Amino acid sequence: MRNFFIFIKCELGKTYEVASHLVDLVEETRQVHSVSGTYDLLAQFAVEKEADIGRFVTTKIQTIPGIKDTQTIICFNAFTSDKGLGEA
C-alpha cells in the first residue's frame, strides 16, 4: 500500500460535512483530523502500490462538495514498526 496525506481547505461552514464524506464514503481514508492554519483538514489515505495518486486526488477527493483547495503530501518511508501499514 502507498500512504499519502492531503491538506484540505473547505468552503466556509463545510468542514464537518467534508470530513464526514471522507470517513463514510471514501474507503481509502485512514484518518481525518481537523487542523489549524491555512487548511481545515488533514486526511491520510492508503491506495494500492500501482494506483495513480494524482487521478485519485482529482477524481475522488477534489470533486467532493465543499472542498475548495488541496495539497497532497506523498510518503516515501514509514519509520514505525508497522511500516505505516497499520499492523501491530
Image: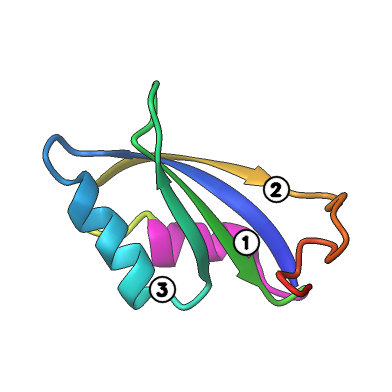
In the picture, the disc for residue 17 is: none
Q: How far apart are the alpha carbons under marks 1 and 2? A: 9 Å
Place of residue 58 in the rendered image (x, y in percent of width and height, measured from the top left): 45, 58
Q: Residue 54 magenta-drawn?
A: yes
Question: Which residue corresponds to mark 1?
Answer: 53
Q: Magenta stretch?
A: 50-61
- Residue ID at (18%, 38%): 11
- Pointers 3 and 1 in contact (CB under 8 A)? no
Q: Nearer the viewer, mark 3 or mark 1?
A: 3
- Residue ID at (54%, 64%): 55
Left-right relation of 5 to 23: right
- Residue ID at (16%, 46%): 14
* Most frequent secondary structure within the magenta stretch: helix
Q: How far apart are the alpha carbons under marks 3 and 1? A: 14 Å
- Disc 3 residue crowd, few under 14, some 14–19, many 20+, Cα 10 Å: few
In the picture, the disc for residue 74 is: 2
The three-letter code of the residue at mark 2 reads: Ile
- Labels 3 and 1: the sequence-earlier one: 3
Left-right relation of 30 to 10: right
Question: Which residue corresponds to mark 3?
Answer: 26
The three-letter code of the residue at mark 1 reads: Ile
Left-right relation of 72 to 25: right
- Pointers 1 and 2 in contact (CB under 8 A)? yes
